[in-house]
Image (cartoon, rainbow, N blue to C red):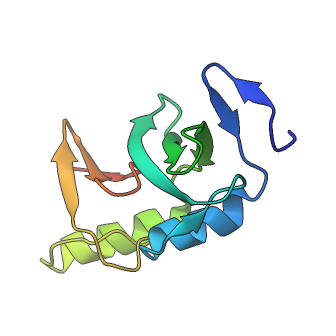
Amino acid sequence: MTEGEHLGDAFRLDREKQLLKQYYAGQQMESPNGGFLICLGIRQEETGDAVGIFECNASWLRYEVAIRKATRTERKKVRDALTSGEEPACPRCVMSARLVRAGKSLVCNHCGIAYGKV
């Protein structure tokens, strides 16, 4: 997809991987139109993936960023933390966001990904 391809009422960004690294680290993300992207929310998908909705603070255009579901390694880190009696933290987010229970899943509020079952 190109940097302007329309998906519903939000555009899709090309540099998703680089932007997600900045988002996980809690850094500001530059918008393609100048200014910075502000996270409006994270929408979880049934597949385990998530979609981040961001808005440019200069142009007010909205963008979607696909967030891939948890890998086996990430799920194993969470499972190991649980079995050792620790509170599991998100394996992706640098700021060590604690995972919270959402139904039967452990989910990161910051990135919206489910990392394990309770």
- Report the label total: 0
Residue 56, image x, y percentages: 55, 48
- Does 39 sit left or right of 105 as displayed? right
In-front residue for pair 54/42:
54
Quadrant housing the N terminus: top right
- Does 67 sit left or right of 18 as displayed? left
Residue 45, image x, y percentages: 48, 31
> Which quadrant of the figure has residue 88?
bottom left
Q: Residue at x 80, y 37 (%)?
A: 4
> Which quadrant of the figure has residue 97?
bottom left
Residue 46's place in the image compared with 31, above or below, is above
Residue 39, image x, y percentages: 42, 50
Q: Residue at x 33, y 53 (%)?
A: 116
Q: Which residue is drawn at 68% across and 68% down?
A: 18
Q: Residue at x 17, y 48 (%)?
A: 101
Residue 113, image x, y percentages: 41, 50
- Does 85 sit left or right of 50 as displayed? left
> Which residue is at the far right?
2
> Which residue is at the far front?
58
> Which quadrant of the figure has residue 86?
bottom left
Residue 33's place in the image compared with 73, above or below, is above
- Does 98 sit left or right of 49 as displayed? left
